[in-house]
C-alpha cells in the first residue's frame, strides 16, 4: 500500500469559507500580527487575543469541508495517508481523515499557559478565568510567532518515508513548514496544487495550477493509475 504524505495550507480551506488570517496589507482581521499572535501580545492584552481567536472559532463552526478535504479522506481507502497541515481548523477531521498532524496547533482546543502538555478540547469561547487544572489561564492551542513548532519532528518523520507527496494550497515558502520537502526521498514525486504555484515542474514535480477543490481530485485520479 502506497504511503502518501499530504502537506496542506490556507488554500486548502479557503474554498470552505475559512478566512486566511493575513490580508494583503499584512493585517490579521484588522490587527497587526504582533497584537494577536505572539506570547507577548497575550501577556499584554489577553482579552484582545482571546477575542480574536474566539471569533475565528465561531466562524469555523459555520463552514464545512470541501471536495478536496473529502477526496483526501476517501483516498485512505486505497493508500496509507498522513496529512500535515499548517491550518488550525478541523476540516480534515470532519471530512473523515484519520492521520493528521497540525503543525500550527488546533483552534478547537485550548491549553494551559504554563504547561504545554495540558491540552483540552474546547469548542466555545475561551474567557478570562477559564483555567487549567494547575490554575493557570487557558490560551488557544495554536503556535504563535516566536514559539517552537512541537510537531515538526513528527512531520519530518512522515515525509521521510513517503512514496508520494501531495502539496495543496501552500506556497511552501514559509519556514519551518517549507523545510519539510527537503526531507523527502530523492525519488519521491510531488503533486503540487495551487492557483499560483511558485515552483516549476520537472520530472519529479507535477503542477496543477488550480484550486484545491478541483486540483486534488485530479491529482488523486492520476495517482490512482499507479496504485
Image (cartoon, grey):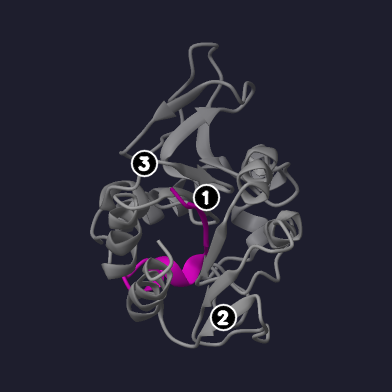
* Residue topped by disc 2: 206
Marks 2 and 1: in contact by CB < 8 Å?
no
Answer with the quarter of the image where residue 175 lies. Answer: bottom right
| Labels 2, 3: front one | 2
Task: Locate residue 2, reporting x and y percent.
Answer: 47, 52
Magenta-tinted stretch: 1-19
In the image, is residue 5 part of the stretch drawn in magenta? yes
Question: For mark 2, does the 10 Å Cα neighbourhood hold few (<14), some (14 to 19), or many (20 or more) residues?
Answer: some
SS type, badge 2:
strand
Q: Earlier in the sequence, mark 2 or mark 3?
A: 3
Left or right of 185 in this view: 91: left
Question: For mark 3, does the 10 Å Cα neighbourhood hold few (<14), some (14 to 19), or many (20 or more) residues?
Answer: some
27 or 152: nearer the viewer? 152
- Cα distance in 3D space between marks 3 and 1: 34 Å
Task: Locate residue 60, reporting x and y percent.
Answer: 32, 56
Count of marks placed on residues: 3
57 or 71: nearer the viewer? 71
107 or 186: nearer the viewer? 186
What mark, if any, has residue 186 been given in the picture? none
* Residue topped by disc 3: 98
Q: Residue at x 24, y 60 (%)?
A: 64
Q: Where 90 sits versus 62, above or below?
A: above
Q: Residue at x 25, y 61 (%)?
A: 63
Q: Residue at x 66, y 81 (%)?
A: 203
In the image, is residue 30 part of the stretch drawn in magenta? no
* Residue topped by disc 1: 48
201 or 36: nearer the viewer? 201
- Cα distance in 3D space between marks 2 and 3: 26 Å
Question: For mark 1, does the 10 Å Cα neighbourhood hold few (<14), some (14 to 19), or many (20 or more) residues?
Answer: some
Amino acid at each position: 500500500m502506497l504511503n502518501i504524505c499530504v502537506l496542506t495550507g490556507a488554500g486548502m480551506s479557503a474554498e470552505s469559507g475559512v478566512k486566511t488570517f493575513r490580508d494583503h496589507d499584512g493585517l490579521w482581521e484588522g490587527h497587526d500580527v504582533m497584537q494577536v499572535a505572539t506570547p507577548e501580545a497575550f501577556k499584554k492584552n489577553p482579552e484582545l487575543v482571546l477575542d480574536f481567536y474566539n471569533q475565528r472559532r465561531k466562524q469555523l463552526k459555520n463552514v464545512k469541508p470541501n471536495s478536496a478535504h473529502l477526496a483526501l479522506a476517501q483516498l485512505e481507502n486505497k493508500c496509507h495517508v498522513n496529512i500535515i497541515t499548517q491550518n488550525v481548523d478541523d476540516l480534515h477531521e470532519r471530512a473523515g481523515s484519520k492521520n493528521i498532524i497540525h503543525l500550527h496547533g488546533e483552534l478547537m482546543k485550548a491549553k494551559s499557559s504554563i504547561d504545554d502538555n495540558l491540552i483540552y478540547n474546547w469548542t466555545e469561547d475561551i474567557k478570562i478565568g477559564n483555567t487549567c487544572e494547575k490554575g493557570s489561564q487557558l490560551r488557544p492551542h495554536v503556535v504563535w510567532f516566536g514559539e517552537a513548532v512541537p510537531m515538526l519532528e513528527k512531520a519530518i518523520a512522515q515525509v521521510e518515508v513517503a512514496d508520494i507527496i501531495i502539496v495543496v494550497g501552500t506556497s511552501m515558502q514559509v519556514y519551518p513548514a517549507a523545510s519539510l520537502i527537503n526531507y523527502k526521498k530523492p525519488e519521491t514525486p510531488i503533486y503540487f496544487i495551487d492557483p499560483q504555484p511558485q515552483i516549476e515542474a520537472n520530472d519529479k514535480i507535477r503542477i496543477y495550477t488550480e484550486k484545491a477543490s478541483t486540483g486534488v481530485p485530479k491529482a488523486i485520479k492520476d495517482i490512482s493509475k499507479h496504485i
